[in-house]
Amino acid sequence: MGAADSLDMEQNPYEVLQLDKELESSEADIKKAYRKLALTKHPDKQRDNPNAAAEFMLIQKAYDVLTDAAARAAWDELARAKASRAARQAGASAKRRKMMADLDARERVWKSERSEEESARAKLKTELERLRRQHAERAKAARAERAVAAVAAGFAARSADAAGGAAAADCAPSVMPEAPAPSHPHVTEELMRTLKVTWDVSEGGYTADQLRAAFAAHGVVADVVLRESKRRSKGGALVVMASLAATAAAAARANGRPGAPLLVVPFFKVATVGEAAPAAQPPTAPHAPAVPQPAAAPPAPTAGSSQGQSRAGNGSGSGFAPSAPGVPAAAAPASGSAARDFESVTLMKLRQRAERERLIAELQAQGDGE
């Protein structure tokens, strides 16, 4: 056991003697391996090796352990315990590796399912947002169309009233009825600043931001409303400018990209920017000077009658009789000028009415065509 005690417990004597069978090796195999190593590892055989004595001493200790029955039995028991522990650890490692692989697989499946759910949720959110925008744009377009119809009806009613007033003016030109104010002047002004824009989708479409940037060169853009066209090859929008001057400038110039031009027409065409203000707020007739009522019959020139004439002419502050009976000298020219002004206003309103009816018919025809 002295040799066994001198051998390091971590050193395998079977490996030292180069026995491949290890525990299965017989005593003859042990002796044969020892003699073979002694022929090559003995210090007398390797005088140039300074470690020859230590190496041969290790071989001698391993041989002593394996040739001693008790020492070999103790070593074999330790070797079997180490092998059993290594086998258990290997089995546990394999089981642990399998558990980790299963866990990774479950995590990948969970992440995949969650990713699919999140993708579907994001897609649903996008579609709902698109439907909300379409609904808002359709509602906005419907409000604009209702405003157009209301303004057209208002213009028709006012034009009919103006025509009736012109007929009455033929009988009594000195009476000047005031032109009725529009029921919705702000709606009229906004529609005057509205442009109808169309383009060919095959040449490239436009977004609201792109349209706003394109028309910003002519002035401030108040609003942009995209329209859904029945023809997929055509796109459309309503662009509301902030001023009538910007509206006229945008309608008179080319707009859009060179490869995808924009067709721009005013929602309500006006001849000039100067005429847009009367269209938004119809002018009132010029104020006609008051025409005094003619006297029934001039009485005899007495003091009482002179005082009566003085009281009748209190508008001018004097009691002198006019050159013509019952009509002041300046009354006739003033009445003729007022009649001509009223006739001009009436004709202008009739022309505007005809022009708007034509534009409304064109817009309705274009909408049906789209």
Image (cartoon, rainbow, N blue to C red):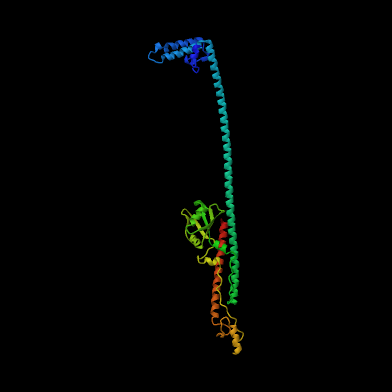
Residue 79 % position (x, y): 53, 17
Total of numbered circles in the picture?
A: 0
Residue 310 % position (x, y): 58, 85
Q: In the rendered image of this protein, does residue 35 appear above or below residue 101?
A: above
Q: In the rendered image of this protein, does residue 333 appear above or below residue 233?
A: below
Quarter placement of the C terminus: bottom right
Residue 100 % position (x, y): 56, 30
Give the image quarter of residue 163. bottom right
Front residue of 124 and 54: 54
Q: Residue at x 59, y 54 (%)?
A: 138
Front residue of 156 and 299: 299
Q: In the rendered image of this protein, does residue 363 appear above or below residue 174?
A: above
The residue positioned farthest toward the left in the image shown: 48
Residue 296 % position (x, y): 62, 85
Is residue 19 in view from this perspective?
Answer: no
Is residue 146 in view from this perspective?
Answer: yes
Give the image quarter of residue 175. bottom right
Q: Residue at x 60, y 62 (%)?
A: 150
